Image (cartoon, rainbow, N blue to C red):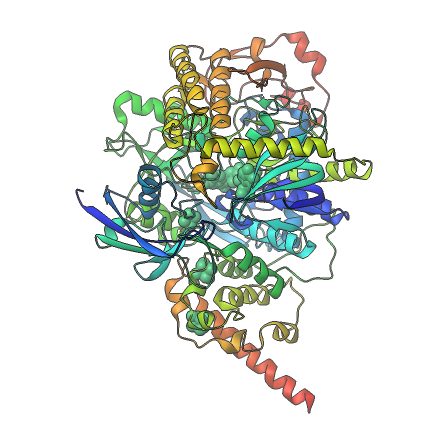
Amino acid sequence: MQTYYSDLLVIGAGLSGERVACEAAQNGFKATCLSIVPARRSHSSAAQGGMQAALGNSAKGEGDTPDIHFIDTVKGSDWGCDQEVARLFADAAPIEMRRLAAWGVPWNRVVPGQSFYFKGGEKFEKYEKEENEGLITARSFGGTAKWRTCYTSDGTGHAVMCTMDNRCAQLGIDVFDKKEAISLIHDGDKCMGAVVRDLRNGELEVHLAKATAICTGGFGRIYKATTNAVICDGGGHILAHETGLVPIGNPESIQFHPTGIVPTDILVTEGCRGDGGTLLDVNEERFMHIYEPEKAELASRDVVSRRMTEHMRAGKGVKSPYGEHLWLDIRHLGDKHISTKLREVDEICHHFLGIDPRTQLIPVRPTQHYTMAGIRTDKDGAVYGLKGLYSAGEAACWDMHGFNRLGGNSLAETVVAGGIIGAKIVEFLKGYETTFDTRVINAEIKRQQERIHDVIHGRNGKLNVYDVRNEMQEALMKGCFVFRNKDGLEECVATLQGTIEKARKVGLVSDGVGCNHELAAALKIEGQVRLAMCIAQAALVRTESRGSHNREDFPARNDKEWLNRTLAYWPMGADMPDLKYEDTTPLFELPPGDRGYGGGKIIPADEKYVKDRTVKSPVTEIGKKK
Amino acid sequence: MGRQIKFEIFRYNPERKGDVPHMQEYILDEHPNMTLFIALNRLREEQDPSLIFDFCCRAGICGACAMVINGRPGLACQTKTKDLPGHIILHPLPVFKLVGDLSVDTGVWFREMYAKTESWVHTKKVFDPAKEEERMDNSVAEQIYELERCIECGCCISACGTARLRDDFMGAAALNRIARFVVDPRDERTDEQYFEVIGNDNGIFGCMGLLACEDVCPKGLPLQNQLGFLRRKMGITAMKQIFRKK
Ligand SMILES: Cc1cc2nc3c(=O)[nH]c(=O)nc-3n(C[C@H](O)[C@H](O)[C@H](O)COP(=O)(O)OP(=O)(O)OC[C@H]3O[C@@H](n4cnc5c(N)ncnc54)[C@H](O)[C@@H]3O)c2cc1C
Ligand code: SF4
Ligand code: SF4
Ligand code: FES
């Protein structure tokens, strides 16, 4: 068996993983990245819209500061985020965007003079200042006070991913693709690396490292309808969670995006609405402004998804063989805009719907999109429960997103968190020596070999992994989607209890030889059902509505009882998660209040609790003025 | 609706002892809006879980799913079955190393390409976090992005006669990559330095200019323009070097 050594093993080579690796390599440490697919195919490259940073260069971003970005982020999270982390993030984001520019990202730049933009279907005029010519410009996104989203046409993720991967090549980082980590090697105290399956030939190998970082992105694929790539299946979460030591933070916090196309759930970017696209109902009439007079289409994603669902429930949806949907209208933006700034959207419409968005409406509905839930870390990115284990990016619950992340804040998080957490890992590596216990390593290899042998030979049963997966996906769609309630969640939990039994009894139909996909699916199915169960159980217990978590039977945001974060542990051998809770944030720069959109009642938190934790900052002052 | 599609798929798993390359047939009911992504996944999940193929984004943006579809390289995820005849023949991309069935190893090929082309901005400037970003003309930024849209699917390499004949030919994607840095003002490499990399038969002078690459590029990259641009530029550089040597 091949064994590889490095100082830092990064599982995942998306933006967050590669950014972490760069930080280590720049400081003289040997970093290795693993990825299921070539790094540039990571889901980061699918992000079209852009990334947020308060540069304040563009006319509509004038006066923007990290303080305002911080406020938007905390409000966006529905006060569910760790405010220390949101602060670290907002402050570092502008520097990180400039660094990316220096590394090669072709950001769109300020073009001075008059130009037009659309909002709510109406045309407006703006003037870009001469003196800002050539600085990084920004576009509008949902839930933000200023235009703050830096972009490269509509291929931001792709362009940044190219630059980051180039940087890794330049620094000589080993980035191995077609390698899937299937378990962590640990002794109950510290993490030593991972057992990895080579997806070219199916062989196992061992990667040992002083520090390990899980940067494997989201787990949208446990839902049936999702915008996520097929590799966003929770593999990284499962590695950490199955140790029994590491909790999943806020599993009930799953984001649904308003504009997945029907029927394939491919995303059309929020940039469509940011650039002035509108949502229409069956009568081809706008409706968002009725529910949200101020922000209309540009309210945050949780709010827009909820309003769309409400509107369809009120009988205003468009019927189709694939269920009801609404329309997205970008016709008025015109040919030039669509064929340059929204070209990917144009291509998606052409290839997957066979329509022309210049003259036709795009069928859309809310669909799973982002997992705020994740491997719980502290503000340094260190994972709870195991020394030497870190996590960054969508895989992590570092928790700057709380119960709803804002568009553009996730791609920005990958590089900002990657930089911050990478630096913390460097600090850790500098003062750390360790030994690798061969007994632990050999035991883990043996465990994995047996596991593989058992599924290939149907030792535990012969259930079909794809059937089990479907059952899990459907249970979540039914009980844990945009709206949730007690009965639905109880049913979901009950179903999943059966599913988890089945997941333990899958056996292969094929022979499992080589880079067999059925085997990969079988190895992670039980872990996936565990994640699904954590979502459902945590959602059932949380009797309030906050951000993306909407309880029809508990519509108020209940700060009195629920200003906290769920930590879902899965003790070894258990059948249900063990839910614990911790304070949402150690301090308030922005004390809990109204978001200014989304409506809903708030049951206020204990005054003394808030006061004791509120710190004086420019933001607290802004809060007071209001 | 109602059509039955016959798939004929190349099968070979090099890890399976005694396996030999062959074609295998499958029948599938067609559904409205069915893509090859949907079809292949259904085949694997309902009929033959040993089938090997790659998909990632399933939205035409990552480049994972390139294969030869009825004789022509293309992205399977954005190919609708209704645009094809009822008999669909699928092969893996040539030129790249075969992993199994329809899956090939593009990762290693492209990683080697980054090393050859030194695919990063070459500059002596050190990033200063305290400073404002260096300015750039928006039209230049757009021009760079235009060339950076390559998704490394490998279609252009597979369609290229020269690449099929010669392992060491860099291919349109690599030459396009160089062009991306040539237009980037941040990259301080000189024409002579680029000439070192591509000014030979493995590079720009090996291209026969037959257009196959641009024809199959799913992103519609202007490969011919770039090849022409580099050929002229490198031609001039070659001339200069000849004169300098004298
Ligand atoms: C369609 C779409 C559009 C989006 N648009 C935007 C946007 O405009 N703005 C924005 O801010 N955000 C956007 N997002 C969200 C954002 O793109 C992601 O949250 C972010 O890119 C995640 O990056 P990451 O580095 O955490 O993970 P990813 O980029 O998903 O990378 C995960 C990596 O982990 C690897 N991996 C996974 N499991 C394993 C394993 N077991 N072993 C080894 N490797 C493994 C994968 O191969 C991959 O390399 C969008 C998301 C989607 C789905
Ligand atoms: S034009 Fe050149 S690079 Fe393109 S296919 Fe022909 S020989 Fe290959
Ligand atoms: S240039 Fe076009 S065909 Fe070639 S790899 Fe890039 S996207 Fe694919
Ligand atoms: S799967 Fe990404 S391009 Fe086809």
* A503 to A432, vertically: above or below: above
Decide if residue A616 is on the left or right side of residue A376. right
Residue at 35% x, 50% y is: B78
Provide residue A175's location: percent of width, then percent of height.
61, 50
State the residue in front, B88 or B132.
Answer: B88
Residue at 60% x, 14% y is: A580
Q: Quick check: can you spot residue A220?
A: no
Decide if residue A105 is on the left or right side of residue A305. right
| Quarter location, residue A119 | top left
Q: Farthest residue toward the right?
A: A431
- Viewport quadrant of the N terminus of chain A: top right
Q: Farthest residue toward the bottom?
A: B246
| Quarter location, residue A468 | top left
State the residue in front, A561 or A333.
Answer: A561
Provide residue A484's location: percent of width, then percent of height.
41, 17
Q: Farthest residue toward the left?
A: B2
* A344 to A440, vertically: above or below: below
Provide residue A527's location: percent of width, then percent of height.
51, 27
| Quarter location, residue B192 | bottom right
Assign ligand 3 to one image quadrant: bottom left
Q: Quick check: can you spot residue A501?
A: yes
